[in-house]
Amino acid sequence: MPDSKIVTRLTEIVGQRNTLTRQDEIGAYQPEGARPKAVLFPANIEQVSEVLRFAASESLSVIPAGSGTKLNLGNITEGADIVLSTKNLNRIIEHGASDLVATAECGTLLSEFQSRLREQNQFLPVDPPHLLSGATLGGIIASNDSGPLRLGYGTMRELLIGLKVVRADGTVFKGGSKVVKNVAGYDLPKLFVGSLGTLGIIAEATFRLYPIPESSRTCLVSFDNLDNSHESVMSLLKSDLVISSLEHLSPALASALGERAGIDVKGNSYTLAVRVMNVEKAVRDQMKTILDLCSKAGGSGVMVEGEKEEKLWEEIREFTSRLSGPGGTVARANVLITDVPGVFRLLEGFPERSGIEVYSSARAGNGVVAVSMDGEREALVSSLKELRIFSEERGGSLVIWAADSNVKKRVGVWGNIGTSLGIMKRIKRNFDPENILNPGRLV
């Protein structure tokens, strides 16, 4: 079918005002290396279903999106005839405060969702990047993105209990429900967490919620060297403390975040940010224990609370985009907790050897190290390859979350996926036999 007729049909489905076709309009919704025929903003699930039925009949590739904050995550797409944004699917359908569950359409902004839940003193305990710049519930599920709160509450896999998805042929699939223990057989909603929109377009989701803790405080503890700060990490993890977030900041990042958040942080020091969210007495008692444990390894700390504490965690959550800026390179090394110091030591050598700027923070209780790099392309490529070899040799992985297309091609986004690649391809073929959804992005 000619492009003009394709655009006409798509416009008929979602309406003229919900269709973008001009290059100057598409802007932020254009995936790297692609020029879509149209960007669509369906108003309801029925329109999503109709768009996909039409796309399947014409073999048109479809790129799912929310606000567009993760449009370039993953491999460079092999095709992008249509970008389908769920931005208009933004209703909060039900909030069962007494049952600690809520259901919302997946174009809902996480920030708006949290605002509504807060009216009942509840929240969805996830804090991924882009929270203030448009992260949607569907995008967070599809990317399985997370932030510092994953230590205390887990990721979307633990919080998602129900899902409604539009499959590539336009049929609607529903899994799970608002009952937390509801799955007999395969837990299919979990399959869509981290699927990057390659198996279907997530339309609605139901989450388990938590009460907002009565009190919160954060201890920022600086150390003279990496060995001492890691010793404190291990002491904290072996203790009976109930820690919500535990970030291990590199010296460069600690200094930068201290300045941005207006907190006096000891210069050139590895620093732990330890957050406890609980009832007031428990927070007060645990803060004292944390300071005592850290001081045994030579740490000296300051206490942060209120607006300054919120600002600090916002800066930790968003540092990969705020410090590297547009076009920066962002990666995540996933290693054992005991291998985190090795990652830091490797990163320490990059600025002197390659001239690149590096900021890093480890989710110290999870073994996830977020890394932001900026510099010459050749130096970035060699540094990322070195970091991947280090991670994979220890049974871990390195994933590129953001980089220019040349760096992605030369380094590879996902690294060695291993023997599960064949199973992933078979699952993809089952859900999307014509390979129209995000082709090539993941498998």
Image (cartoon, grey):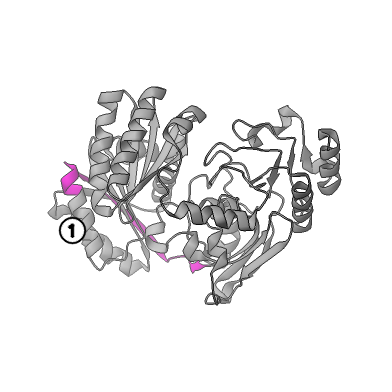
**Residue to which mark 1 is pinned:** 293
The answer to whether residue 426 shows anywhere in this view is yes
- Please state if 206 lies on the left or on the right of 243 as rendered: right
Q: Identify the residue at image location x=82%, y=38%.
A: 7
> Which picture quadrant has residue 58?
top right
**Seen in the image, is 84 located left or right of residue 209?**
right
Q: Please check the rendered image and state whether residue 23 is part of the magenta-colored stretch, yes or no.
A: no
338 lies above or below 375:
below
Residue at horizontal 62 percent and vertical 45 percent from the top = 438
Name the spot of residue 97 as percent of width and height, x first.
58, 72
Q: Front-most of 14 and 251?
A: 14
Q: Residue at x 23, y 45 (%)?
A: 341
363 sits left or right of 285 in the view: right
- Quadrant containing the N terminus in the rendered view: top right
- Left or right: 379, with 169 as reference point: left
The image shows residue 209, relative to residue 383, as above or below, that is below
The location of residue 357, given as percent across then percent down, is 34, 28
Mark 1, Cα crowd under 10 Å, few <14 / some 14-19 / many 20+, is some
Q: Which residues are magenta?
A: 209-229
Quick check: is 224 in the magenta stretch?
A: yes
Tell me the element at label 1: helix
Is residue 194 at all visible to an observer of this figure? no
- Mark 1 is on which residue type? Leu
Percent from the top left, x then y, of residue 91?
A: 69, 59
Q: Position of residue 376 (x, y in %)?
A: 39, 22
339 or 288: nearer the eye?
Answer: 339
